[in-house]
Image: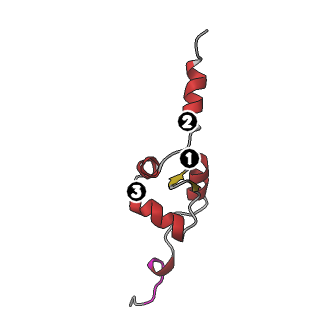
Amino acid sequence: MGRDPARLESIMEDRWLSVDEIAAYLGIKRDTVYKWISEKQMPAHRMGRLWKFRKEEVDEWVKTGGAGESGSQNSDTGKK
């Protein structure tokens, strides 16, 4: 009895991603991932000492503006 390749691929797509994997997926540095977890409530789950991510949760967070610029970067103070 063999394994269904489509089902196996689906299982692998539904796996938890590491900090390095989610950074590569989003095209950002891993330091930015840690900053977003602490400052922007990026959806992440702590498993022991490691942070893990669900791709679908991160996609939704990005789509709803979670990764958008905030704070002093959007401020017009100091501009003439």
Residue shown at 59% from the left, 58% from the top: 43
Taking the image as shown, residue 66 lies to the left or right of residue 20, namely: right
Q: Amino acid at mark 1?
A: Lys
Q: Earlier in the sequence, mark 2 or mark 1?
A: 2
71 magenta-colored: no
The residue carrying pointer 3 sits among few (fewer than 14), some (14 to 19) or many (20 or more) residues within 10 Å by Cα, namely: few
The quadrant in which residue 12 appears is top right
User: Is residue 51 or residue 57 the one in the foreground?
Assistant: 51
Residue 14, how many percent across, how many down? 59, 38
Task: Quickly name the residue at label 3.
Answer: 28
Q: Amino acid at mark 2?
A: Glu
Q: Earlier in the sequence, mark 3 or mark 2?
A: 2
Labelled pair 1, 3 in contact (Cβ < 8 Å): no
Q: Which mark is residue 27?
A: none
Q: Amino acid at mark 3?
A: Ile
The residue carrying pointer 1 sits among few (fewer than 14), some (14 to 19) or many (20 or more) residues within 10 Å by Cα, namely: many
SS for tag 3? loop
Residue shown at 46% from the left, 52% from the top: 19
Residue 38, how many percent across, how many down? 52, 68
Tell me the chief SS of the magenta region.
loop
Residue shown at 55% from the left, 53% from the top: 48
Task: Quickly name the residue at label 2.
Answer: 13
The residue carrying pointer 2 sits among few (fewer than 14), some (14 to 19) or many (20 or more) residues within 10 Å by Cα, namely: few
Labelled pair 2, 1 in contact (Cβ < 8 Å): yes
Q: CA distance from mark 2 to mark 1?
A: 9 Å
Specify the segment rendered in magenta: 73-77
Residue 45, how many percent across, how many down? 59, 55
Q: CA distance from mark 3 to mark 2?
A: 20 Å
Task: Quickly name the residue at label 1.
Answer: 55
